[in-house]
Image: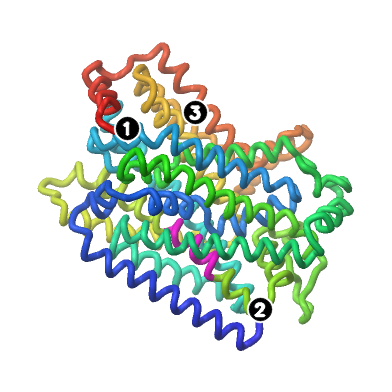
Amino acid sequence: MEIGSKTATFIILAIYITIMVGIGIYMSKRTKSSEDFMLGGRNVGSWLTAFSYGTTYFSAVVFIGYAGQFGWMYGASATWVGIGNAIIGSLIPFFLLGRRTRLMTNHLGAKTMPEYFEHRFDSKKLKTASALIVFIFLIPYTASVYNGLSRLFGMVFDLGENGGTYIIIAMAILSAVYVTLGGYKATALNDFFQGIIMLIGIGTVVALTVQKKDGLSAALDALNTISDSKTEAGTLGSRFGPDPINLLGVVILTSLGTWGLPQMVQKFYAIKDEQAIKKGAIISTFFAIVVAGGSYFMGGFVRLYCTLDSADTSGKALIQTVDGKPVYDTMVPALIHQALPNLLIGLVVVLVLSASLSTLSSLVLTSSSTLTNDLIKPRIKNFDDKHQVKFMRVFIAVFLVISVIIACNKNASISTLMSYSWGALSGAFLGPFLYGLFMKKASKAACWTSFITGVGISVAHMVLFSMNIEAFSGIRQSVIDMNCPLNLLSPINAGAFSMILSLVLVPIISSFTKAPEDKVVENAFSSLNEAK
């Protein structure tokens, strides 16, 4: 990247950071209570909610990690993941979960998902267990976002081996500053500003990616000429790609997963009214089509811009490899390096930074709120609102420090970190949260079953297949030798399976176990009769 272009990028970044911090300072004067800090006073409108939902959903994990990996593996058919994200992950949950979540959590006085489980199922132990799950498994997701940021910044500024670490630390500090200052409303307002940047940036990158390969038809034809040991010629440019079964696993994990993620459904706790939910559904779906659809569509053409042997003008490899296998997280940075003029790379840097900081801010706010509200507050006497906000601010720092330490270890890929995080969280919470809103007979036993299986599947899969423990090498090899069309080694498929299992297990277990007392259930469902 030329010196002049670097200077322009630094100027853009400086302006961007100044605005972010300025919003945090502005909103800090309007944050008076713990409910303001966690939920914006439950008075957030449709535009801010929709953009906050979308920008929390999509980050460097999607743009750098998933777009590169699945674009390489599935070609143009990776676009289906973005379409699934828009319909299953954005449109449906607004209409299906939005109103009931807003009314029931408000009526029960629940500020977090663990607090919802406590009041809905009359169980403090459920609250404690779910709070621990949230705190532990949001950490790898946060680390994956930092990892994506460091990859892009390392490419743009040629920062060397340790440069990514400095970027990770700087981004942690920046996200901590404005979340600590202004809480939920600062996060939502920043998300709106960052969402505008993401829409413009993605549109620009997608247009240039296709244009440089002589248009869409020519680009698809070129994809169809590519083949390797795992991919037949004619499939990468086809409608459903070379491996539709495992592609479906990606769609399920990244789309259905949002229904059970605390940082996503918490947007419905804070939304203003039912009209805001309806408008928010349309806005968030449009946002997802552009951002997620555009990211995966762009990633589908990554093979046209770089191969395992590609190098830049200095002879440096565009795609990193380990033991002859590509490092997927380096693919989108390589595409950007080839497809975009230097002056526009600054736009991409701010695009990915916007996507990532918005996600990070929501993750750290969710984690610190859960830890303080659900684990610390019940165990300390005279823990007033002022102390609660102070503790949340401290735990923001603690959460970020742990995430940074994990992110600085580059052995785990972005997609692996996110898959285990989403698989454990949504695998544990999806069934209990969804059926808790709709089914009066949903039981505590069913919740515990879902918690144990969701976390258990993710942890077991991680130990057996991702940690390279010598004692389990025989199991890994046996799975490989099965030649199953469904990739059982994939943490993505493990996460998707745990989510589906949660939806199946909760109604089955509830059918023969005891529901909470009638007065508890009726109190929760009486909220649904309240004025819209």
Give the x, y percent position of residue 10: 51, 81
Residue 138: say if magenta. no
Q: Earlier in the sequence, mark 2 or mark 3?
A: 2
**Residue 365, x across and y down, in percent:** 35, 54
- Furthest residue toward left: 382
Q: Which residue is mark 2?
A: 342
Residue depicted at x 79% and y 42%: 242
Which SS does the magenta portion mostly show?
helix
Q: Earlier in the sequence, mark 1 or mark 3?
A: 1
**Which color scheme does this rendered protein use?**
rainbow
Q: What is the C-alpha distance between the residues marked 2 and 3? A: 47 Å
Q: Quadrant of residue 336?
A: bottom right
Q: CA distance from mark 2 to mark 1?
A: 50 Å
User: How packed is label 2: few (under 14 Cα within 10 Å), some, or many (20 or more)?
Assistant: many
Mark 3, Cα crowd under 10 Å, few <14 / some 14-19 / many 20+, is many
- Mark 1 to mark 3 CA distance (whole Å): 15 Å
Pointer 3: what residue? 502
Residue situated in front as seen by the camera: 401 or 11: 11
Instruction: Identify which amino acid the numbered label 3 is placed on.
Output: Ser
Residue type beneath disc 2: Asn
Q: Nearer the observer, disc 2 or disc 3?
A: 2
Residues at circles 2 and 3 in contact by the CB criterion of under 8 Å: no
Q: Residue at x 72, y 61 (%)?
A: 322
Bounds of the magenta segment: 350-360
Which residue is tagged 1?
117
Three-letter code, disc 1 = Phe
Mark toward the start of the polypeptide (2 vs 1):
1
Picture quarter containing residue 123?
A: top left
Residue at the image point whose x is 38% and y is 69% from the top: 20
